[in-house]
Amino acid sequence: MTDMVQGRESLVRLLEGILAMPGVTVYAPVAEGDGAAFGRIGSASEALLDCSGVVRPPRQILAPMTEILLTVEPDGSTVDRVPAPEPMILFGARPCDSRAIAFLDRVYAGGDRIDPYYAARREALTIVSIGCREPRATCFCTSTGGGPLSREGSDILLEPSGEGWIVRVITDKGASLAGRAGLESPDERVPDPAVSPMAGEPRDLAVLRERLEKAFDDPRWEALTAKCLGCGACTFICPSCHCFDIVDGEEDGRIVRSRIWDSCQFKTFTRQASGHDPRPTGAERYRHRLMHKFSYCIESYGMPGCTGCGRCVEACPVNLDIRLLLDAFGGGK
């Protein structure tokens, strides 16, 4: 048993050991086009273990972009499609993405009504996160209540220390995997003082929420969000966004009910059957996005719906930076 992963070769050997566990599906950052995404791997050589800028977040593992919920057969019988996945391990998630999954847990499975499709996959998933040594320029996780070494959502956190990583076992799931992988969590090993990064300045989220609510009718919303195209890129690469639509169709003589991702930034997202749209302008839609993440989600789920991963900052085709909007309406730090 060891409480340290002593460098990159040891990290690769740890992943190889996990891949050798029978009946386990492993996801990790992999190359996709010109970028990276979380995908299923069969060998450690496929994993981009040094990549801190994975474009597509891991939420699709738990809430696929498109999934069939149920089918109605020609004889009228209904077949539910709740998944029954084998054990899954997400290896190499960054703390912002693991914290986003902790947020999604509250959305899909934290109240009286539990989404069985999400819950089945989440129960099967164990998360091994790798802390960030050097946050990217677009990261601001510290400003959202997290941090490059945040443990929230992770079952095991590999905390950078020197050339290696300290093993932090956080949950019972993590303890089970650690035991099988020959890992243990140290009681006495202290964090490496040379690795204490921050990504953005800390914010008082209660103050931010209060200021955003007071700025609801601020006329600057229109001018500051005027260049937004409403393309929805910011929502589709967000690790914590969760808007979806339900559609019925026909496939091979059966009625198929599917769930697909949607975006609050699309022009028709809130248009009602009567033709009325409570958020008809781009400024109102962007204001809703910001208010939802930093006001409504805190009220409903006890944490913001943004983990500061910075993907939306990098993906926006017109460089609309959410951090500047937070400064403008949230009053700086």
Image: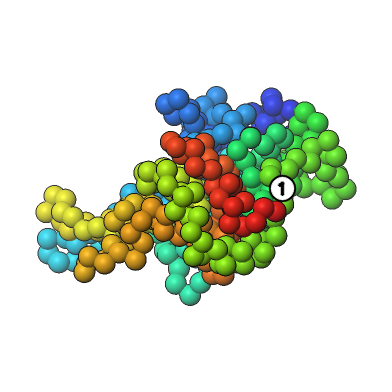
Q: Tell me, yes or no, if residue 281 can be seen here.
A: yes
- Quadrant of image for the N terminus: top right
Q: Is residue 30 above or below residue 60?
A: above
Dot 1 alpha-carbon crowd within 10 angstroms: few under 14, some 14 to 19, many 20 or more: few
State the residue lying farthest toward the right. 188
Q: Quadrant of residue 276?
A: bottom left
Q: Amino acid at mark 1?
A: Glu
Image position, residue 217 (x, y; %): 49, 65
Residue at left 12%, top 64%?
Answer: 75
Residue 3 appears at what percent x and percent y?
78, 41
**Number of marks:** 1
Give the residue displayed 62% in from the left and 67% down from the top: 210
Look at the image and name its color scheme.
rainbow
Q: Residue at position x 77%, y 28% from top?
A: 163
Q: Is residue 2 visible?
A: no
Residue shown at the point (51%, 27%) measured from the top left: 46
In the picture, measured across the screen, residue 86 lies left or right of residue 270, that is: right
Asked whether 243 or 174 is in front, the reply is 243
- Of 285 and 18, which appears nearest the observer? 285
- Residue occupied by mark 1: 201
Task: Return the residue nearer the eye: 224 or 201.
Answer: 224
Residue 116 in the image: state x and y as whole percent: 42, 63
Residue situated furthest bottom in the rendering: 112
